[in-house]
Image: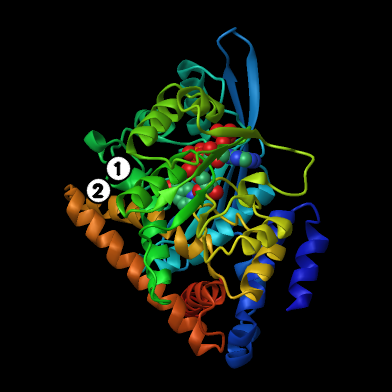
Amino acid sequence: MSDILDAIRARDPWEKEFYQAVKEVAESVRPVLKRHPHYVSAAIMERITEPERIVTFRVPWVDDQGRIRVNRGYAIEMNSAIGPYKGGLRFHPSVNQSILKFLAFEQVFKNALTTLPLGGGAAGCDFEPKGKSDDEVMRFCQSFMTEMYRHVGAHTDIPGGDIGVGSREIGYLFGAYKKLTNQFTGALTGKGLQWGGSRFRPEAAGYGCVYFAAEMLATRGMAIEEQTCLVSGSGNVAQHTIEKLIQLGARVVTLSDSSGHVFDPDGIDTEKLVFVKRLKNVRRGRIREYTDKYPHAVFTPAGASLDHNALWSHRADCVFPCATQNEIGEKDAYALINNSVKLVCEGANMPCSSEAIAVLLGKNILYAPGKAANAGGVAVSGLEMVQNSMRLSWSGEEVDERLRIIIREIHRTCLEAAEEYGTPGNYLNGANIAGFVKVVNAMVDQGVV
Ligand code: NDP
């Protein structure tokens, strides 16, 4: 196993996030490979860590001043053993091949857990939507799609939202796709309700994350009601995590964006959340403005030079990191433990560093990795694809009920796999093992391709 990790590090030493994601899975599945040596002789680890295809391309566009700008786009088609590639589309200046490979790799196992026939992929661009006009975002999306349309399709690769890609971007991308292909198909998810979208898709990752947390708490005889919660981020996943927490009677006291975090000792209620949604989704402002409207709340700027994030030092019972990768480091994990946190449930992808996870698991904190806890997002994307194929639209109640069933099933699957391989209650091992076994069995069945 260490041979594979060494080879990955030697070949692409700058791909730190990808290496981190692979190492985590590799450590979890060690007992699986020991019990099933035919996976080793089938070179499964070598194959599953190598993307089936990577496309990288130029994205030229013209800004409002008439200047030509150039960004770099990527599509990582990681694994199609159990279905067409499916994953998020990220527009953020930090996007590079390592980040998209880690997202695509995680997605392979996450999608396998959803019980839906979805392979794993990711796409994106180092474009910064913040501070751009709607027209600039539209021109950029149209240019991005002039290459991407060759690779996406309802039966090949179906991107959905991720950081920097919400309903506005999906709309522009879908419009361009339709124009270029002359086809109205479900080649993207997160579409508007009037043009092929699913009810509850915007809510799904956040709601699913809270459903997963509730299942975890129930295993220790606790409920989400009246728990004090820390949430990071203020985008799609954070907003809907907070919304569901409020609905279930929890008390949320934080929010953040890349400029810093807000602590509201009075708790964030429905009215305040409506303000946040308007601030972030319509006005596209900064989270600091929350304290102008609600002066009891305190804003703390992000300290780029610090080795910890002050957001995680507030007292709480449950923690939902919903912003980005590696936002909880080792020091933050100790801060959470010192504050008697009972649960960490990842809304974002890989928000806890490997060191932080080790600290949390060492103290027997309930910890759910993103590939299990935020799988509700891709699950409802899968349901959107089903509705598109059937050319019908399910009610909100129906989609929410299916989401709850899928999350319950993922939770049960994680616990069973963890138990079967000797680490009962370890959701990290359970998620990695269950997703891995499903995908590699399909790979073995399909031969060396
Ligand atoms: P959004 O773009 O809607 O929101 C992202 C939030 O995270 C913003 O508040 C943003 O702040 C903050 N953020 C981004 N980068 C950083 C950074 N480097 N440091 C601090 N804060 C940062 O994205 P989503 O809510 O869709 O995605 C959040 C996470 O959830 C990601 O990890 C994504 O992969 C994951 N996810 C998303 C799903 C979805 O369906 N959208 C599904 C499953 C997982 P700012 O505005 O300042 O950049």
The quadrant in which residue 124 appears is top right
Residue 114 disc label: none
Please name the residue that numbered disc 1 is placed on. 185
Q: Is residue 53 visible?
A: yes
Please name the residue that numbered disc 2 is placed on. 388
42 or 371: nearer the viewer:
371
Colour approach in the figure: rainbow
In the image: residue 94, left or right of residue 382: right
Asked whether the residues under the numbered discs 1 and 2 touch, taking CB atoms below 8 Å apart as contact, a structural biologist would say: yes
342 or 358: nearer the viewer:
342
Relative to 26, residue 274 above or below: above
Relative to 310, residue 120 above or below: below
392 or 145: nearer the viewer:
392
Q: Residue at x 49, y 30 (%)?
A: 146
Decide: few, some or many residues near mark 1? Use Cα within 10 Å; few <14, some 14-19, many ≥20: some
Q: Residue at x 44, y 63 (%)?
A: 111
Relative to 413, residue 33 above or below: below
The three-letter code of the residue at mark 1 reads: Thr
Which of the image's four quarters has the C terminus? bottom right
The three-letter code of the residue at mark 2 reads: Asn
User: What secondary structure is marked by label 2?
Assistant: helix
List x then y, in percent, for residue 319: 52, 56
Q: How many marks?
A: 2
The quadrant in which residue 25 appears is bottom right
428 or 8: nearer the viewer:
428
Q: Residue at x 37, y 31 (%)?
A: 171
